[in-house]
Amino acid sequence: MVVKMDYVDDLSDVIPNEALEAFKKLISRKNVGLACDFLMRHYRDEYWPRRTGSMPPLRKRLSSNVITLPKPKMMSAPISTVIINRRSADDFVNEPISIDDLATVLYLGVGITGWASAYGYDKYPLRAYPSAGALQPVEAYPVINNVLGLKSGLYHYDPFDHALELLRPGNYGSLMADLALGQDHVSRAAVIIVLTVVYARTYWKYWKRALRYVLLDAGAAMENIYLAATGLGLGVRAVGAFYDNELCNFLGIDCLSEFPVVMVLVGKGIYETYQ
Ligand SMILES: Cc1cc2nc3c(=O)[nH]c(=O)nc-3n(C[C@H](O)[C@H](O)[C@H](O)COP(=O)(O)O)c2cc1C
């Protein structure tokens, strides 16, 4: 690959010299991905939020087959205890969890916990997870394997009505394990919550910072789910290894405007590792 270094030097009015030097060093070592990321981090003109066009909608309705969830449970365990007790379950017992527990995990993970006036709206939602610009790119798709009172299948969580939309009934436990590179503990989780991000929501304001921000938002939502499940005495494990295209096909998303970030398994946990 040939990079015209004089072109890079032309950028010196917007990028500090040290950053340009580091960029050149990384490029000369053919570390193109890191070099571009490094340059972007120092490109001063790109730091500022810029809004282009109208704000992308926050709500995604995918099905009229809607099941309203029970109210989330409130937990009394101290947050310090929950954080210290949080561990990833090594495996899951093939047993059901209750719909109340699922409702609690979804609400404390990605639910609407407050309202504010923002972006010209009198009533603008705020979420359980912190979100860059409160733009809320995260969508949750629970794949239900074993939840009392719910048919197995692929669902989408609607935080506005605290409800599940049924997208596709069926038993998808072993398909999900295949999509997760054959990790068979995935098939034994009572529910696999796939967290995706709708890129345009964050990109609308944060442009080149958007990739970083949507991933951070999804990570915060993931940790909320970890803590909520731990507080309920359930097992939980993040799974980041999966085939993107196949998972997108299954979810019915395009992997560009919306893409999956992490699966979070929840169920009756088995712990072997760090005892
Ligand atoms: C982003 C991310 C991706 C992960 N991917 C996987 C995975 O694909 N499969 C798996 O079994 N565990 C996965 N884990 C769980 C980690 O292995 C686990 O968090 C780690 O061993 C530390 O253990 P602890 O969570 O009990 O502290 C992932 C965790 C994170 C945060």
Image: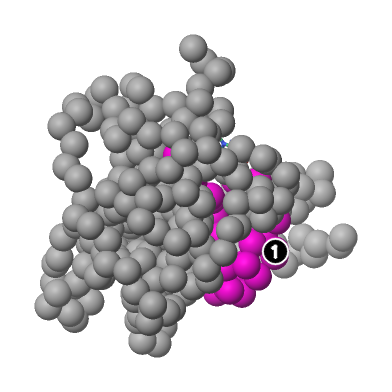
Q: Residue at x 61, y 38 (%)?
A: 185
Q: Position of residue 268 (x, y in %)?
A: 44, 34
Q: Is residue 82 left or right of residue 236?
A: left
- Quarter of the image holding residue 86? top left
User: Does any atom of ligand 1 lie closer than 8 Å to the CB of label 1?
Assistant: no
The front one of 173 and 38 is: 173
**Helix, strand or loop for disc 1:** helix
- For residue 121, say whether it is visible: yes
Q: Position of residue 53 (x, y in %)?
A: 40, 87
Q: Residue at x 19, y 27 (%)?
A: 78
Q: Would you place residue 272 above or below residue 245 in this image? A: above
Query: Is 112 contained in the magenta span?
Result: no
Q: Which residues are magenta?
A: 240-267
Q: Is residue 227 left or right of residue 208?
A: left
Q: Amino acid at mark 1?
A: Glu
Crowd band around label 1 with a 10 angstrom C-alpha radius: few (<14), some (14–19), many (20+): some
| Residue pointed to by mark 1 | 246
Q: Residue at x 60, y 43 (%)?
A: 186
Image quarter for ligand 1: top right
Identify the residue at the far right of this view.
1
Identify the residue at the far bottom of this view.
53
